[in-house]
Image: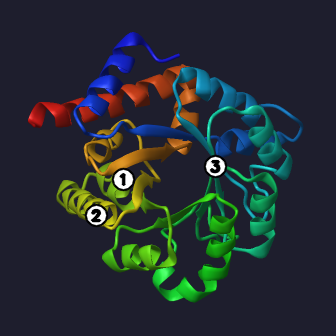
Amino acid sequence: MRGTDLDTKATMIEVSNIPYLRLGVNIDHVATIRNARGGLHPDPVAAAHLAAEAGADGITAHLREDRRHISDEDIARLKDELDLPLNLEMAATNEMLEIALRHRPNACCLVPERRQELTTEGGLNVVDQEEILRPIVDKIKTAKIRLSLFIDPDEEQIKAANRLGADIVELHTGTFCDKMYFGNKSEAEIESKRLASCARMASTAGLEVHAGHGLNYDTAGTVSAIPEIVELNIGHFIVGDAIFKGLQSSIQKMRSIMNDARAGLIAQR
């Protein structure tokens, strides 16, 4: 469970008019490990329960067309067993739309998907696919499911997302994280400023702003200090770190870094 110090920081953040920053934990790669051997272990749904106990605010799972990690049964169990909101990442296909309408998660996040990619390599090109996406977006919203679009931090993509009627944009942080990882500090600073500018633009347009992809202990603090961002979705790093430290410990450390960054915003005001 969240410790008292984390509860106190979260309360400070809410009272200061800086929104509390939610942590969505992506459990895809627990399923990746399971599927490497077959069978039932390790169970991603059990990981989701542990994440909830450690202070996660939501669970994210990407049901891919090729089912390389999360399975249909995992989605059904997550929806049935979990009290936390479920964010279903999915390609904009009729198959995935049918699954989403059947399970009715808290949110559907439309992402680009290619079979040959190791992981999602960039944001959804909403500008070029606006009319293709519209029927799927409309059906998801008609079903009272929150609609999120995973996009690059780009002004034209934000405008297109707003025209489509998205509830949320999740800004792709992968470029920023890559620049930090490979030690290109000046380019990383440019990318962080771009994230901040696009977060402000999206928030001003009435879109809820999330962020994710490639975040770790070294990069999460910078993104957490962007006040318009209200949710981070982090998976691969947390699952990898959990091999050495345990899932609950890794989540609690990430939660602490996020809250410290938000508390730093308060100190600046």
**Mark 1, mark 3: which one is toward the viewer?**
3
Mark 3 secondary-structure assignment: loop
Q: CA distance from mark 2 to mark 1?
A: 25 Å
Residue depicted at 50% across the width and 46% down the height: 233
Badge number at residue 188: none
**Quadrant of residue 21 within the rendered picture:** top left
Residue depicted at 46% across the width and 23% down the height: 252
In contact (CB < 8 Å): disc 3 and disc 2: no
Q: Which residue is mark 3?
A: 106
Q: CA distance from mark 1 to mark 3?
A: 28 Å
Residue depicted at 74% across the width and 50% down the height: 69
Q: Which residue is mark 1?
A: 177
Would residue 53 be found to the left or right of residue 226 on screen? right
Amino acid identity at mark 1: Cys
Q: CA distance from mark 3 to mark 2?
A: 23 Å
What is the quadrant of the C terminus in the image? top left
Q: Residues within 10 Å of mark 1 (few under 14, many from 20)?
A: many
Would residue 97 be found to the left or right of residue 221 on screen? right
Residue at the limit of the structure toward the left, as seen here: 269
Badge number at residue 204: 2
Q: Point out the tag, 3 or 2, that comes first from the N-terminus.
A: 3
Q: Residues within 10 Å of mark 2 (few under 14, many from 20)?
A: few
- Measured from the top left, where is residue 171 in percent x and y? 41, 60
Mark 1 secondary-structure assignment: helix
**Render colour scheme:** rainbow
Amino acid identity at mark 2: Thr
Residue depicted at 62% across the width and 61% down the height: 118
* Nearer to me, 202 or 213: 202
